[in-house]
Image (spheres, grey):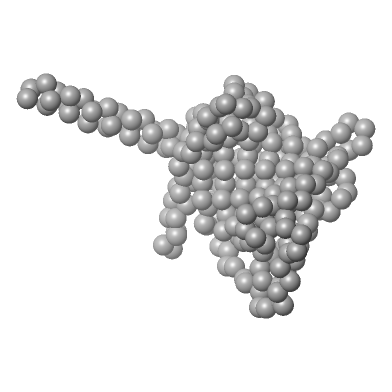
Amino acid sequence: MILSMIYFSLIIFTMIIKTMQLNNSLANSCFNFNGRKDGRNNTCEIEIMKNPPTVRNVKLECMQCTIKYTVDYDDIKPTCSKDFECATLIFDNNFMFEKFFRRHRNKIRDMFPFKSTVLHHLILEIIVTNYNITNITNQYIQSNIDMDAPNVDIYLKFNRHSQGLPPLTVKREIYLFKFGFLEIHVLCDDGNSSVIYEVRKDSLMGTDIFMEDRCPKFQSTEPVSSYKYYSVD
């Protein structure tokens, strides 16, 4: 009976310690946009990324944040631990994504470690759940997400387009960005497969764009209906 009580107490103690460590890690992480405004919440949590790009047979702790409202610039503190080599930022629509990055992209680059220990390049994944834009251009990338961070690779994912709009395409032109690498995923109408655009830097040609179309042969051609608009702080 005494041994059982001791064993049970050790289990409880271990769970408390792990919870404290997790909360401390979240609180001190640069990728912590927790907060509340008008009944809406930004939430951040640790997620496990299996087999990150360029590295296999690795499980890596990453920060994942769902951002539903604009964070004040001063609320993003530059003096915090930099433990995460990868982060995922999830936005409900492209308006929130664009507004957030135009305000904070110069701070976001400083949220990563100065050097990666596991990855070849640090990973920033951006997920835009709903969008009403029809194409990506160099101007769009430069005005929204470009940051002077050559050791950061950016993976930009667009999921659902507004009814009546065609799926998003990436314009073939020279892209001038100062981060390491850009990959854009556009979800197909079937909700499973996607079109993938890789925009790679080339010292002679500027950038090269490689497209891999995994969509079914026939995309949806539903008639145009009313657009879906989103409100942003």
Q: Is residue 103 left or right of residue 150?
A: left
Where residue 122 appears, as percent x and y from the top left, is: 64, 31
In the image, residue 223 above or below residue 23 = below
In the image, residue 145 above or below residue 216 = above
In the image, residue 66 above or below residue 221 = above
Where residue 183 appears, as percent x and y from the top left, is: 72, 43
Q: Dividing the image into 4 quarters, which one contains the C terminus?
A: bottom right
Q: Which quarter of the picture shows residue 125?
A: top right
Question: Which residue is pictured at 59% across the width and 57% down the height?
Answer: 129
Q: Nearer the viewer, residue 65 or 9?
A: 9
Q: Is residue 30 visible?
A: no
Question: Which residue is pictured at 57% across the width and 39% down the height?
Answer: 87
Q: Residue furthest right?
A: 204
Q: Dividing the image into 4 quarters, which one contains the N terminus?
A: top left
Where residue 4 appears, as percent x and y from the top left, is: 12, 25
Number of numbered markers: 0
Where residue 74 appears, as percent x and y from the top left, is: 53, 45
Q: Nearer the viewer, residue 100 or 79?
A: 100
Q: Residue furthest front?
A: 217
Q: Which quarter of the picture shows residue 109?
A: top right
Q: Is residue 61 visible?
A: yes
Q: Is residue 30 left or right of residue 190?
A: left
Q: Which quarter of the picture shows residue 147?
A: top right
Q: Residue furthest left?
A: 1
Question: Which residue is pictured at 69% across the width and 52% down the height?
Answer: 194
Question: Which residue is pictured at 62% across the width and 47% down the height?
Answer: 126
